[in-house]
Amino acid sequence: MDKYLKDDYYDEEAYRLRFYLEEHAKIAHMGEIVVSSAEKPIIGTTALDTCIGIVFYDRKNKKGIVGHAYDSGKIKMMHDMIELLDKDNHQVIEYAIVSGYRNVERKNFTGEIELLDYLEKHCPKNIELKPFQSLNIQVCSNVLAYEFAFEVSKGENVGNYLFYEGRNSRNKYR
């Protein structure tokens, strides 16, 4: 009996943490761009199926931008996200381009390649680009799609907690 009480307590605490994180998060939905702020330092996206997630992260200044691009709007979204970057001062931007679950399943990375090419050609000269290595992409618990979220002050993954759906939900990683 004690085992079940402990598991219930864990679930309750996990849900409390999830709701707390939701209050401090901006999650990009299809066709949206979100920018972190002091009030909302957690950014990410969910339900990446045939879409592509785009991340820009300025670790030094603790700022991030996430876009959730559908295939036909991916170049415009990349352009709009580049426009949000500071064009005057030197900065290091960590980036990630995340293909959706179906794209990976079909081994279709053309959208990712197009976006990388566009980024390299159109990124302002004051910006040094580096791959964002610590982005933890996971499979949504209720559908076969990717999701991720991170906290910009430390660049740490919070997706496991923010998207928590109970102990028995799917917990696969890419």
Image (cartoon, rainbow, N blue to C red):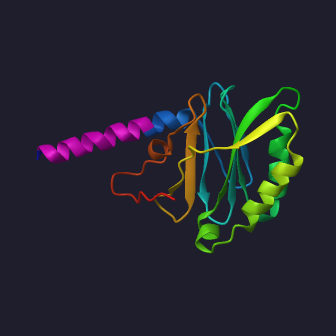
Residue segment shown in magenta: 2-17
- In this rendering, the answer to whether 133 lies above or below 104 is above
- Is 123 on the left or on the right of 110, as rendered? right
Looking at the rendering, which quadrant does residue 111 occupy?
A: bottom right
Q: Residue at x 88, y 37 (%)?
A: 125
Q: Is residue 72 left or right of residue 68?
A: right
Q: Would you say the magenta stretch is mainly helix, strand or loop?
A: helix
Residue shown at 41% from the left, 60% from the top: 170
Magenta-drawn stretch contains 8? yes
Residue placed farthest to the bottom in the image? Answer: 106
Q: Residue at x 88, y 39 (%)?
A: 124
- Report how many numbered discs are placed on residues in the image: 0
Foreground residue among 165 and 68:
68
Q: Position of residue 30 (x, y in %)?
A: 70, 55
Residue 142, position in %: x, y?
47, 61
Q: Residue at x 63, y 62 (%)?
A: 100
Residue positioned most to the left: 1
Q: Is residue 10 toward the left or the right of residue 131 in the image? A: left
Q: Is residue 109 above or below residue 134?
A: below
Where residue 95 appears, as percent x and y from the top left, is 70, 45
Residue closest to the eye, 81 or 7: 81
Query: Residue 59 at what x, y percent from top left?
Result: 65, 31
Residue 12 lies in the magenta-colored region: yes
